Amino acid sequence: MSRAPKRQTLLRPGNRRPIGRQGGKRKRPPARLRQVGEALLLLAAGVALLLALMRLPERLDTLLLISNAIANLIGGLSKLGLGLLQLLGVVLLVGVVLLALAFLAGGLVRLARALLRPKTIAPSSPR
């Protein structure tokens, strides 16, 4: 009793039709002339960008631009590091303040318990 497995298809939500091509229609490949036109447009755009990049050093000192960018990056990173160190210092200071307040509160509570505790009279044992 071997059965052929049923073919599973995806269903659109709220619709009982399978997703995909309907009716077995095939998508036509683009026309050859259109493909050639797209290829020529891409080639022209690439050549134009390369020509613009070749003329860039005439109008702009690229080495100066790159060195300024690197200097700004290093300066920004050093400022970031300094800011993080300062923030760490503030967090450490707040931690020490909280620790001091906890010590004060603990000391006051122990002092109050020691002073307010009723005296216990020890039973005297006969000798």
Image: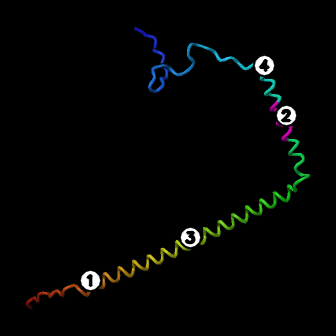
Q: Is residue 111 left or right of residue 12?
A: left
Q: For numbered disc 1, what is the local secondary structure?
A: helix
Q: Nearer the viewer, mark 1 or mark 4?
A: 4
Q: Can you identify the residue that label 1 sits on?
A: 113
Q: Nearer the viewer, mark 2 or mark 3?
A: 2
Secondary structure under tag 2 reads helix
Amino acid found under the numbered disc labelled 2: Ala
The magenta region covers 41-49
CA separation in Å, label 2 and label 3: 55 Å
Q: Residue furthest top?
A: 1
Which quadrant holds residue 33? top right
What quarter of the picture does the C terminus occupy? bottom left
> 10 Å neighbourhood of mark 1: few (<14), some, or many (≥20)?
few
Q: Are marks 2 and 1 in contact (CB under 8 Å)?
A: no
State the residue position of label 3: 88
The quarter of the picture where the N terminus appears is top left
The x and y percentages for residue 40 are: 83, 29
What kind of residue is marked 3?
Answer: Leu
